Amino acid sequence: MTQNDWQGRLTQHVADAVRHYRKERGLSAQALADACAKLGYAVPRTSIANLENGRRSGVEIAELLVLAKALEIPPIALMLPVGMSGSVEVVPGEELPIWDAIAWITGETLLGSEPQPGTVAEIIYELRIHAQGVNQVQKAIQFAEETQRHGLYSGQRLNGKDMQESIQAYARESAGDLREFRGKLRARGIEPPALPEDLKFLDEPQ
């Protein structure tokens, strides 16, 4: 087996995936090309046709990303046969179960495990925790605002405290925890992801 053999198989998978998702969405090759152009990176109809017909030896990263966006799928769905095969040849001569291949590409850390300190896997692990924190804070603030706006739980008591006050306190604590976590990331030299507009106040000086 040669490197070109593996590259050819990889390119053929991308081609098959592009064709599959394009047809699933009822798009012609021209419609897909137009969608790519609207995203700011041209992938001509002839390039798409040549890819699907096996007349191309490879796919550029930029093309793959724009095609995935235009097809409204994650790029990994073009890179790997997600849900279509139980295993995949990730590099020449090395075949992995499909989930192991996904985990390798995405830097996934298995449940119950922690990555080695100082590795890219650790950074990805920490960023996932951050994403979960952002989601938690947004939901806590939204719930607190809704209960206050509609007067929900008004007059109810929880361990001697007003229910609405407890909900508000939980939202503030969640926001404070996320602010502190972002500070710890920066102290370790890790730049945290940009916050959504409704949480940008967490980066403001206190």
Image: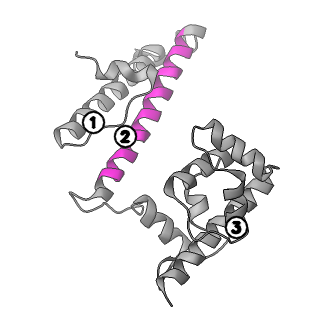
- At 28% across and 17% down in the image, what residue appears? 204
State the separation of the CA atoms marked 3 and 2.
35 Å
Rendered location of residue 191, percent (x, y): 27, 38
User: In this view of the protein, which residue sits in the foreground, 97 or 172?
Assistant: 97
Q: From the viewer's perspective, is 54 left or right of 1?
A: right
User: CA separation, marks 2 and 1?
Assistant: 8 Å
Q: Nearer the viewer, residue 7 or 141?
A: 7
Residue mark closest to the camera, 1 vs 3: 3
Under circle 3, the secondary element is: helix
Mark 3, Cα crowd under 10 Å, few <14 / some 14-19 / many 20+, is some
Residue underneath mark 2: 130
Mark 1, Cα crowd under 10 Å, few <14 / some 14-19 / many 20+, is some
Q: Give, as a three-letter code, the residue at label 2.
A: His
Instruction: Estimate the x, y position of residue 62 in percent, counting from the top left.
Output: 51, 51
How crowded is the residue under tag 2: few (<14 C-alpha within 10 Å), some, or many (20+)? some
Q: Residue at x 57, y 43 (%)?
A: 41
Instruction: Give yes or no for residue 139 being in the magenta stretch.
Output: yes
Q: Is residue 188 above or below residue 178?
A: below
The reply to whether callout 1 and callout 3 are in contact (CB within 8 Å) is no
Residue 87 visible (yes or no): no
N-terminal of the two: label 3 or label 2?
Answer: 3
Q: State whether residue 135 is above or below residue 176.
A: below
Q: Residue at x 77, y 45 (%)?
A: 31
Q: Which residue lies most toward the bottom here?
A: 1
Would you name the residue on which mark 3 appears?
A: 16
Kindly identify which numbered label has been placed on residue 181.
1
Q: Which residues are magenta?
A: 123-148
Question: How far is disc 1 from disc 3 in space, using C-alphas?
Answer: 43 Å
